[in-house]
Amino acid sequence: MKERPLYLIENFIDHSLNEAELRELQQLIRKDPDVGNALAEATHLHGLANTVQHEDDSDLTKRVNESIIDLSPNQLEQAVIQAIKKQPNRRNRSILPLWGLAIAAQILIIIALSLISGSGPDDGSVKIATVANCTGSTFVVNGETKKRITAGSALNSGDQVFVEIDSAATIVYTDQSELFLRDRSYIKLVDLDGAKHIHLFAGVLHGDIRKQPKGKPMRVHTEHSRATVLGTQFEINSSNDSDLLEVIEGSVEIEKSDGQEGLEVGQHEYAVAQPAHSIQVKTQGVPLYRSPLITKDSPGQGVDIEVDITGAKKLYLVTTNGGDNNRFDHVVWLNAKLLGSNEYDLREIPWGIAKAGAHNTQLDKGYYDNPIQVEDITYEHGITTHATSVIAYDLPQGCTHFKATAALLDTALAPSNATPSVRFEVYTELPENKLQKLRIRKLHY
Amino acid sequence: MNSLNETIARVRAGKMNAYKEIVHEFSPMIRVYLSGHIRDFRDVEELSQEIFVAVYMNLDSYNPDLSFPAWLKAIARNKLMSYFRRHYSQKNMTNELRSEIIEHLPEPELAANAATTDVMKQLTRCVAKQTEEAAQLIQARYFDREPVMEIAARLKTTEDSISSKLYRIRKQLKRCIEGGLTA
């Protein structure tokens, strides 16, 4: 087969054909059945490979079975709430059939504690929040209904919100409490007698929460923990590996799903919840330096950094993903030096940790083995990495300053639809919460 | 599994648990089909669930004289088109053209002639038999889902060259899989 149809087939699969090329491919398929067969085989092979990788992850049969049971999940939840409130002693009486109770048990695990203080039914059709804005692809599921949401969409109790890849959403409750969801985040909102409950299935949830009514704290439930929020700014990263709760302002009480006693996490503290480990509360690392947000529009695509590190024994160079996602966040630390009693080129000092959000941290190489280039200027030397990244060094004695230029590589800007954004940070204490976040999000990805 | 028509009859008679057998039997076929066009596996799982719920709801309209897999595939194709309309809400010709192309694609020979789970097993075996260069390309393209443009940039070659190599690799894999299925 000729090269042109094969080129079009591969780029069709990559969603990178424009309208004229799609028409060309369509014409080729009509004229030559072999082209259609080749495209069908190519997509089939993609499908086989993808399914082989996820063969063990699927509980599709179980989920389908639960879906086809008569009541929708939201109605079932309401029925369970009513049943429990009417029947405080359920030993001898069961309102729901056994199959309904089996499913209700799963929901009860999540909401049981908060039902004790509830009074009065929750009407699932009552609006509890609004989508303030959203980018990319975001949709809401309630029962079997699924629809895309946009700015201004109303959200009701029981709604499950899905924020897909390269997307984000901000949700505002009626009391002006705000939730910000990063890409690949999935939550369910439940309002029980005025108490806000959020089930964070996976992803990153940032909350800026007004003071909640007495006796009705906001709760965030994940696979590993439950956090009780009184009126606070916080962020929770969650995946099947673990949760990381960071409190920016106020305080949050966190307890593990296995019933471990709750601990309070205060301002500038963080806690990690993971299976088979106790929760520990620690102080968030404070960077000695934090850059402004660097994007393709930043002068020089980067920033000059000079930091006093007198007395430090360790140096940690952190590149964060700018708060959206880490796609195309390729960066370089140029002319990185340690100054003091001696001058050291940082490239000559072996790193102890070199974590990157994608690909690897490298010396003197750009991405895809291209040279290091920033604004079309080629550099022979530099430390390249991909956000979110942590690179750690043991410092020689006598260092007083760290100096470097940190910038986005030109490869980050190469695709026309790339929107890289990063921040550069310098620490002299281990930024453990950054490493933990990297672990959770990498596993989540 | 009991004969398919018997299982369908049991489901129609109200034996909901019998439907699990149908889902278990045909979910690999549906997941492979969807995964060829949808990159995010979470979306594949969700859409698969939607499809099997729709099949259950419409089981009364299934004509047992027709091929069940073909009927199921038709429902899946409609759901896939709806998915594209939901997820690509910009009304532009690009998305319409993509949908038209996918809608009229023929059934791949391997999918038509063998059970999906058998093909998947053979795929794993056949990938292991490839040369190192081919295996690396297979890993990058089909398992890591690296775009052709990035593979070409990384290997410092042209997209045409990579596209041609992938075509030859697919032919080799198909021959190997067919050989394994008939052995």
Image (cartoon, grey):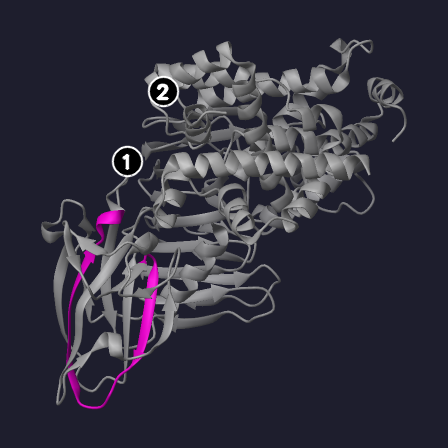
Q: Nearer the viewer, mark 1 or mark 2?
A: 2
The kind of secondary structure element at disc 2 is helix
Identify the main secondary structure in magenta. Answer: strand
Quadrant, the N terminus of chain B: top right
Quadrant, the C terminus of chain B: top right
Q: Which residues are magenta?
A: A386-411
- Of residue A393 and residue A38, the one placed in the foreground of this image is A38
Looking at the rendered structure, the number of numbered marks drawn on it comes to 2
Q: CA distance from mark 1 to mark 2?
A: 18 Å
For label 1, the crowd category at 10 Å Cα-Cα, with few meaning under 14, some 14 to 19 and many 20 or more, is: few
Q: Is residue A427 magenta?
A: no
The mark that comes first in sequence, 1 or 2, is 2
Name the kind of residue labelled 1 in the image: Asn
Whether the residues at callouts 1 and 2 have beta carbons within 8 Å, the answer is no
Q: Position of residue B142 (x, y in %)?
A: 53, 41
- In which chain is the residue bearing label 2? A
To which residue does mark 1 refer? A417
Name the kind of residue labelled 2 in the image: Glu
Q: Residue at x 50, y 33 (%)?
A: A159
Whether residue B28 can be seen here: yes
- In which chain is the residue bearing label 1? A
Residue A21, disc: 2
